[in-house]
Amino acid sequence: MIVRFWGVRGSLPSPESQKSIREKISDIIEKILPEDLASPASKERFIKGLPPWLYGFAGGNTPCVSVQAKGFKEIIILDSGSGIRDLGVHFSAKQQGIMKYHILFSHFHWDHVQGFPFFTPGYNSKVKIDLYSPKKRLENILSNQMKSPYFPVKMDKMAAQRNYHCIDSPFSIGPCNISFRKMVHPGDSYSYKISHKGKNMIYATDTELSQDDFLPNPENTSFFAGADLIILDAQYTLGEATDKYLWGHSAFSLAVDFAAAWGIKHLVLFHHDPAYDDQKLYGILRAAQLYIQQMEIKELEISLAFEGLEITL
C-alpha cells in the first residue's frame, strides 16, 4: 500500500501561525558563515545541518489521506478536507487512468468535508465515486453544504456517478479489507483499518484517547494490535489536553504510549493544531522522539504528518 498525505491540519491555519518563505530564507541567511560557502561540500553540509522546519511547510490543508494498493487502479480516500482538492488535481493532471474513488468519512465536522465541493474528479461524468460512513443520510449531509448560501454549485451538478454506503460491518474495496471502530469525539468519529497482503494501516483522527482504548479486550486487540502504521490524532501537548478535556483530541505523548502499548510499528502524528507553526510541530516531533528514548520504547518509528509525505507498506 502507498499512503499519501494531502491535508494534515485540524482546521485551516491563520497566516500568523505560518512563517512565510521570505521569513524562512531570512532565518537561513542569518545562520550562514563564510566557511559554509567555501565549496560545494561545505554548502551541502550547511544545508543538511539546517533544522527541518526551515526546509518547507507541514501544510495548511485539512485532513485528507489517500491509500493505493499495488496493482489496484482505484483510490481509497480517508476524509475530504481541503486537501482533497490537491489530490483531485494531482490525479486528473497526471492522467493516471484513475476513474474510481472510494471516500471513507471519519465524521462530518467542517474540516473533514469542506474540500468535497472542490474535488475535480467529481465533475467528470466518466468517474465513479463510492462514499462510505457508519452514519445514515450521507448524501443529505454532503449535499447540504452545497446549497445556497454556502456554495454556488449544487451537488446534482457533480457529473460523476456517486454511490452511498451506510456501513455496519467490515467490508472490502478491491483487494483491501476494511474495518472501523467508533472513537471518543464530540458527535462521534470513526477510525478505519485497511488491510492488504498482510499489512495493516489505521487512520484514527479526531479521537480523545482514554483508558478504554488501552484495555486488552478482544475488540481493541483485533483492531489495533501489531498494526504496521497508525495515523493518529496528536493535536495537543499534555498540558493542553488536560485543559481541553472532552474536546475530542489527544496529546502527542499519549499517542506514543498508545502506539507502544499495542505494538504498532510506525506512528504518524496527525491533525495538527492550526495555531502551531512548523517550528512548533517539529519541536513536538523531537519531544516525542526523546520521550520514546526516555521510556525505552523499542521498535517504534515516529513521523510528523506533512503534505507530500508518502509511506509505502
Image (tube, rainbow, N blue to C red):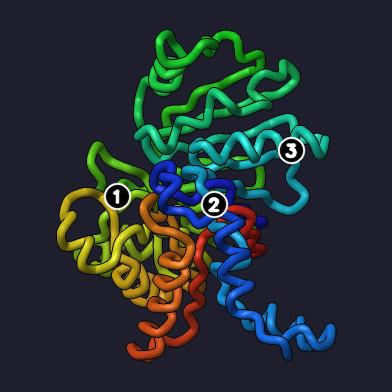
Q: Say what amino acid the circle numbered 3 marks.
A: Phe
Q: Is residue 116 left or right of residue 69?
A: left
Looking at the rendered image, the quarter that the C terminus falls into is bottom right
Between 273 and 132, the residue placed more toward the observer is: 273
Between 201 and 170, the residue placed more toward the observer is: 201
* Residues at marks 2 and 3, CA–CA distance in whole angstroms: 19 Å
> Which is closer to the viewer, label 2 or label 1?
2
Q: Which mark is residue 183?
A: 1
Between 42 and 262, the residue placed more toward the observer is: 42
Q: Which mark is residue 91?
A: 3
* Residues at marks 2 and 1, CA–CA distance in whole angstroms: 26 Å
Q: Say what amino acid the circle numbered 2 marks.
A: Gly
> Disc 2 on helix, strand or loop?
loop
Q: Earlier in the sequence, mark 2 or mark 1?
A: 2
Q: Which mark is residue 49?
A: none
Residue position for label 2: 59
Q: Residue at x 31, y 72 (%)?
A: 253
Q: Residue 194 placed where, x, y %?
A: 53, 52
Q: Residue at x 16, y 62 (%)?
A: 242
Q: Earlier in the sequence, mark 2 or mark 3?
A: 2
Q: Crowding near pointer 1: few (<14 within 10 Å), some, many (20+)? A: many
Q: Residue at x 74, y 38 (%)?
A: 91
